Amino acid sequence: MTGSKVLVIIIWILRGAVSNKWEIKMPQNINAISGFCVQIPCQFEIPDSFKGSLNKSVEAIWKKSDLSGLTVFSSKTEVSSLLKGSVIGNLLSKNCTTVFHNFPAGFNDTYFFRLQGPEPLVYTFQQGVDIKVHKDSSPPTLTPYVEILEVLEGTKVTLTCSTALPCPSQQPLMQWNPRLGEQLTPSLQVDEFGQTLLVSSQMFNATPLNDQLKVSCSLLYNSQVAERLVKTSTTLRVLYAPRNTIALLSPSGPVSEGNVVTLSCHSEANPAVQRYEWYKHIGAGNLMLKDQGKILTVIASVNAQGLYVCKAYNNHGTDQSMVVAVELKSFQCSIAPYIMCGLLTFLLILITAVDLVKYKSLLKRLKQVEGMREPMTYATIQKTNDSSVYNIIQARRREDISWKL
Ligand SMILES: *[C@@H]1O[C@H](CO)[C@@H](O)[C@H](O)[C@H]1NC(C)=O
Ligand SMILES: *[C@@H]1O[C@H](CO)[C@@H](O)[C@H](O)[C@H]1NC(C)=O
Ligand SMILES: *[C@@H]1O[C@H](CO)[C@@H](O)[C@H](O)[C@H]1NC(C)=O
């Protein structure tokens, strides 16, 4: 350790042990909401020689604009002060924390704290606090604070919403919209200047469903006189590797040789798919790169038929589709029905022809038979017709008649 460092440490120890300074610790700025209360966290330090005067009769004063400015508040004349409020800290333990009620809109200014007696304890602290009065409360702070929050799918995201409370006794309602995953109940934290922060976190796993989702944290301030709602939002952008990748075929069925088949690849990805690749199965689980691009055009042929897959890529990964088959209309298959039909027709004609021949020969034989029989039959009839029967009948008639007579 060098000599100078030792000296610095000794001085520092001495300073801590014997306070010789007038010091005040307050926030530099406080954002107040008009009509709502303001709490100024305040802690002071006085030289040891004045500590004897720090008793119950000490008067706390707040001055406006500059060190010798207008007294707007005195702990001795609280009721008649310009600003209504009270010192809530214990002055004897050098705590000058003050609350002003219904802070007025026109009081945008710097405020200085002054100890006014008992003598010789009279001092205005050099450092002031800037109180900015806003009509509306300041929107809460989101951490990480970005307009668009880019996260990878599956990332555990923690969003934290916080706001410095102008006045912890008027705590706003802090809410998340939408509520995602797990929320921690809003809690109060105190920063190094004694200002109270209201903090709430929610944790969730980023999914593609959260993409483009606007997440906001809102504060609802409610007092007897006013109600204010403010919010801060961030839009989630969930990045993910390609998913739901499919290959589509058009036309979808088997095609004739020489026809065009269009294969198109579709995939969801964020950012959008940057590259598509088409592969053809070449047996034994091996793939051969055919082309790049969303669309692959194939002229149907014996060589081109087969199984195809597409792959989609972006910065975050890749995804592969199921296989699609480019099929050729089989030659045998398409001709077979005609052959069958022709064969059947031929068979039918053959049978008909055979039948016809058979019929004709039958007819011929029949005619031959008839040709032999014809004259004989005719002669028989003629002979029979000749007279005998008639004669018999006639003879009988004659006989009948003669017999009757
Ligand atoms: C406070 O101290 C002053 C002088 O330092 C003394 O005159 C006064 O009586 C004390 N007051 C009380 C209440 O102790
Ligand atoms: C000062 O007083 C306020 C009000 O009572 C209290 O909240 C705060 O913690 C005190 N500060 C310190 C440093 O003790
Ligand atoms: C107070 O100051 C802030 C910031 O300088 C400003 O935005 C606001 O309008 C002022 N309010 C009044 C009432 O003057």
Image (cartoon, grey):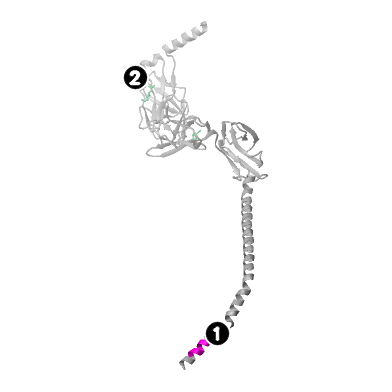
Residue designated by label 1: 390
357 w.r.t. 371: above or below: above
As rendered, which of 201 and 364 lies closer to the eye?
364
Upstream in sequence: badge 2 or badge 1? 2
Residue designated by label 2: 55
Q: Amino acid at mark 1?
A: Tyr
Q: Residues within 10 Å of mark 2 (few under 14, many from 20)?
A: few
Is 374 positioned to the left or the right of 99 in the image?
right
Q: Is residue 396 magenta?
A: yes
Please tell me in which quadrant of the rendered image residue 372 appears.
Answer: bottom right
Give coordinates of residue 78: x percent, y percent: 36, 30
Q: Nearer the viewer, mark 2 or mark 1?
A: 1
Q: Which mark is residue 229?
A: none
Is 76 positioned to the left or the right of 309 in the image?
left
Q: Is residue 140 magenta?
A: no
Name the residue: 52% across, 7% down. Answer: 4
Please tell me in which quadrant of the rendered image residue 101 appears.
Answer: top left
Label 2 CB less than 8 angstroms from ligand 1: yes
Work out how far the residue at label 2 is from the one at label 1, CA to CA, in angstroms.
Answer: 181 Å
Name the residue: 44% across, 10% down. Answer: 13
Give coordinates of residue 390: x percent, y percent: 55, 84
As rendered, which of 224 and 146 lies closer to the eye?
146
Extent of the magenta region: 395-400
366 w.r.t. 232: above or below: below
State if disc 1 and disc 2 touch (CB < 8 Å): no
Please tell me in which quadrant of the rendered image residue 278 appears.
Answer: top right
What SS does tag 1 mark? Answer: helix
